[in-house]
Image (tube, helix red, strand yellow):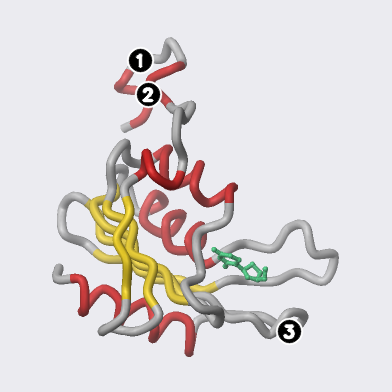
Amino acid sequence: MEYKKLIELAIDARDNMTYTPYSHFNVGCAVEMEDGSVYTGGNIEIASYSPTNCAERTAIFKAVSEGKREIKKIAVVGDSDYTFPCGVCRQVIREFSKNPEIIVANSTEDYKIFGMEEILPHSFGPEDLDGDENDRK
Ligand code: THU
């Protein structure tokens, strides 16, 4: 899917899919998986704060729970000037791709694209564990 379309879906998620009664800081995410399917999500806040789920994880977990395992592109749109994925979400993105295109957008006209190595250098990932590749399917 082209960048602009994915960003539009992330903007729609930011505007319509969040639950942010505490921070009122809205973030939306649209993730395109290797098979072309797209999942969207917003951040979800919890009164005791730590269970709060970022928009990126909401969208990725929706995809993973539908059996998808490989991220192709992920677009993030928040309420700040270029809202970057937090550290936890960077690790979650890494779990489901070694080199996705990470699009951090202010609008469909104003966005930047990053690689995994740029935002999470020298990462630890599934390949570091001595697992059977089939276990991740
Ligand atoms: N948040 C996200 O959803 N994604 C990010 O990349 C950064 C932070 C959320 C978490 C919390 O609900 C709010 O933004 C303020 O931290």
The residue under the point 42% across, 25% down is 126
Above or below residue 48? Residue 24 is below
**Amino acid under disc 3:** Pro
Locate residue 46, reporting x and y percent: 75, 69
Q: Secondary structure at mark 3?
A: loop
**Amino acid under disc 1:** Asp
Q: Secondary structure at mark 1?
A: loop
Locate residue 136, reporting x and y percent: 36, 29
| Outermost residue, bottom side | 15
Above or below residue 137? Residue 55 is below
Q: Quadrant of residue 97?
A: top left
Q: How many marks?
A: 3
Q: Which residue is mark 1?
A: 132
Quadrant occupied by the N terminus: bottom left
Q: Which residue is mark 3?
A: 21
Between the residue at mark 1 and the residue at mark 3, the CA separation in whole angstroms equals: 42 Å
Earlier-in-chain disc, 3 versus 2 = 3
The residue under the point 51% across, 59% down is 85
Residue 135 got which mark? 2
**Amino acid under disc 2:** Asp
Between the residue at mark 3 and the residue at mark 2, the CA separation in whole angstroms equals: 38 Å
Query: Is residue 129 shown to the viewer in this render?
Result: yes
Q: CB under 8 Å between callouts 1 and 3?
A: no
Badge 1 local density, few (<14 within 10 Å), some, or many (20+)? few
Q: Secondary structure at mark 2?
A: helix
Q: CB under 8 Å between callouts 2 and 1?
A: yes
Depth-wise, is mark 3 or mark 2 nearer the camera?
A: 3
| Label 1 CB-ligand 1 distance < 8 A | no
